Image (spheres, grey):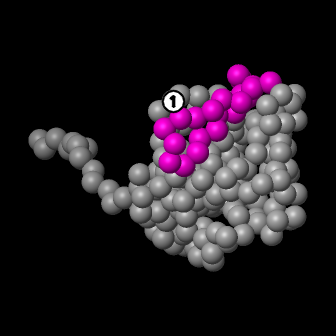
């Protein structure tokens, strides 16, 4: 009697952003029912934020949107996709982002921006407080052209600000004011306006 065994090893090709877009066009992925990012060639589901995280995203995004309107830049919410990483093979959707007028060309590629926004904002969810998670995403954004990354920690009521080319980061707390320096001047957002 022959015994059937399951395949012990399965080899899969790493997906690219172009592969993912083709899957969407073929109807294999429903973007209305599935939130995801492309990480190291695999589609990783990212659940939607809870009410508190969503409110924080909206507050930051609204401030960036109003600033972008005054400066001819562009601001985006969490549904905008950016191809990031060394070879732009990761697909990330920061919770809020800003693209300066000088870098609007990254938005010309379709369906996702070919590069990182100048500012990428990540509002960390309960499962995303680890340093390893944060560091990896920050690095991907900087490899693709970001100048600033804000990691917003609602639990600690603080924002970690990373700047491209720096081996230091700043932790903003209490009534500190976030700016877009060195990307643009004139933007100010007080932490007390973010956290309730």
Closer to the camera, 74 or 47? 74
The percent coordinates of residue 173 (x first, y second) are: 75, 26
Q: Inspect the magenta stretch and tell me whether residue 168 lies in it.
A: yes
Quarter of the image for residue 102 reads bottom right
Q: Is residue 28 visible?
A: no
Q: Residues within 10 Å of mark 1 (few under 14, many from 20)?
A: few
The percent coordinates of residue 19 (x first, y second) are: 46, 68
**Quadrant into which the C terminus falls:** top right
Identity of the residue drawn at 47% across and 55% down: 143
User: In the image, is 92 to the left or to the right of 158?
Assistant: left
Q: Is residue 173 above or below residue 54?
A: above
SS at circle 1: helix
User: In the image, is 96 to the left or to the right of 163?
Assistant: right
Identity of the residue drawn at 83% across and 28% down: 175
Identity of the residue drawn at 86% across and 30% down: 192
| Residue labelled with disc 1 | 131
Closer to the camera, 67 or 23? 67
Q: What segment is highlighted magenta in the picture?
A: 154-174
**Quadrant into which the N terminus falls:** top left
Q: Is residue 85 visible?
A: yes
The percent coordinates of residue 169 (x first, y second) are: 58, 35
Closer to the camera, 113 or 38? 113
Q: Inspect the magenta stretch and tell me whether residue 155 lies in it.
A: yes
User: In the image, is 30 to the left or to the right of 157?
Assistant: left
Identity of the residue drawn at 55% across and 68% down: 114
How many marks can you see? 1
The percent coordinates of residue 122 (x first, y second) are: 66, 42
Instruction: Please identify the residue farthest to the left as the structure is shown.
Output: 1
Closer to the camera, 33 or 175? 175
């Amino acid at each position: 009697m022959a015994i059937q065994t399951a395949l012990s090893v399965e080899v899969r090709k790493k997906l690219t952003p172009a592969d993912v877009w083709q899957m969407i066009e073929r109807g294999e992925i429903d973007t209305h029912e599935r939130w995801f990012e492309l990480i190291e060639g695999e589609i990783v589901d990212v659940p939607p934020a809870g009410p508190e995280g969503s409110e924080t995203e909206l507050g930051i995004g609204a401030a960036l949107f109003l600033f972008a309107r005054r400066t001819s830049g562009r601001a985006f919410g969490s549904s905008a996709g950016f191809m990031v990483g060394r070879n732009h093979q990761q697909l990330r959707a920061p919770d809020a982002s800003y693209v300066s007028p000088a870098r609007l060309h990254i938005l010309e590629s379709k369906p996702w921006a070919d590069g990182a926004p100048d500012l990428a904002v990540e509002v960390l969810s309960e499962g995303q407080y680890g340093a390893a998670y944060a560091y990896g995403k920050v690095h991907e954004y900087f490899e693709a052209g970001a100048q600033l990354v804000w990691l917003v920690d609602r639990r600690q009521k603080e924002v970690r600000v990373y700047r491209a080319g720096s081996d230091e980061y700043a932790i903003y707390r209490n009534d500190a004011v976030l700016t877009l320096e060195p990307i643009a001047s004139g933007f100010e957002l007080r932490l007390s306006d973010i956290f309730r």
